[in-house]
């Protein structure tokens, strides 16, 4: 079913997505995420839709914001925040950072440097973590009505540098290990494009 919808969008979406310099884009996404903590680990899969999750209680905010500095080349602001709560354990994390995308016809691709912060709290402990990722992304846009497009995209994140964790119960120092995580995020949503005066 999902593949059929994607094929239909690709088949009917061959429109020239000519976004001129000075265009502003805003939107919101639904995302599917698969996380691997190391190259040999099994993937942990999470799917979120609005304020609900299909396998955990969560709330996700994933707005999109882009500004075209030249025709079909945009600078993007990445921000995503998720809050999880299973009753005994609270966990929140956020991604943010700069990105750039190049649009060709209805397709686009780009990259980013993304910072990650997380905080978890339970009855027995509390800790915060920080790390960074290199991100590659690609997708397609399909015009629905004037200025409004469906956006389907995929992002692949690769851990870079160290994963630094600070535990409240161990104040003597941080715990540091190499960030070998990879993440695959598949998103769909709506984007609006407006030419600024």
Image (spheres, rainbow, N blue to C red):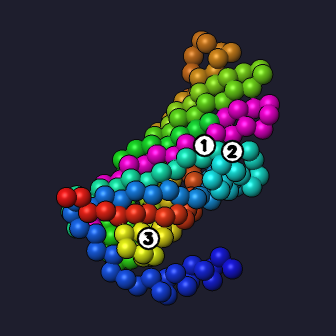
The secondary element bearing badge 2 is classed as strand
* Alpha carbons under labels 3 and 2: distance apart: 27 Å
In this image, 36 relative to 111: left or right? right
According to the picture, the residue beneath numbered tag 2 turns out to be: 58
* Alpha carbons under labels 2 and 1: distance apart: 7 Å
Q: Which mark is residue 53?
A: none
At 64% from the left and 25% from the top, the residue drawn is: 127
| Residue 127 against residue 115 in the figure, above or below | above
| Dot 3 or dot 2, earlier in sequence | 2
* Alpha carbons under labels 3 and 1: distance apart: 25 Å
The secondary element bearing badge 3 is classed as strand
Mark 2 touching mark 1, by CB under 8 A? yes
Work out whether residue 60 or residue 155 is closer to the camera in this orientation and state it.
60
According to the picture, the residue beneath numbered tag 1 turns out to be: 82
Region rendered in magenta = 72-91
| Dot 3 or dot 1, earlier in sequence | 1
């Amino acid at each position: 079913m999902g593949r059929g919808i994607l094929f239909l969008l690709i088949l009917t979406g061959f429109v020239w997505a000519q976004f001129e310099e000075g265009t502003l884009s805003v939107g919101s996404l639904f995302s599917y995420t698969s996380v691997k903590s190391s190259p040999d680990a099994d993937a942990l899969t999470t799917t979120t839709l609005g304020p609900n999750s299909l396998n955990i209680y969560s709330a996700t905010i994933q707005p999109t914001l882009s500004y075209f500095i030249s025709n079909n080349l945009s600078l993007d602001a990445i921000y995503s925040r998720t809050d999880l709560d299973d009753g005994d354990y609270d966990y929140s994390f956020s991604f943010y950072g700069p990105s750039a995308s190049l649009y060709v016809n209805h397709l686009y691709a780009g990259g980013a440097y993304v910072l990650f912060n997380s905080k978890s709290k339970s009855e027995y402990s509390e800790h915060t973590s920080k790390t960074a990722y290199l991100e590659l992304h690609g997708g397609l846009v399909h015009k629905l009505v004037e200025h409004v497009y469906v956006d389907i995209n995929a992002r692949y994140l690769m851990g870079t540098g160290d994963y630094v964790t600070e535990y409240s119960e161990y104040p003597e120092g941080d715990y540091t290990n190499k960030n070998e995580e990879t993440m695959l995020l598949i998103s769909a949503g709506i984007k609006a494009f407006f030419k600024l005066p």
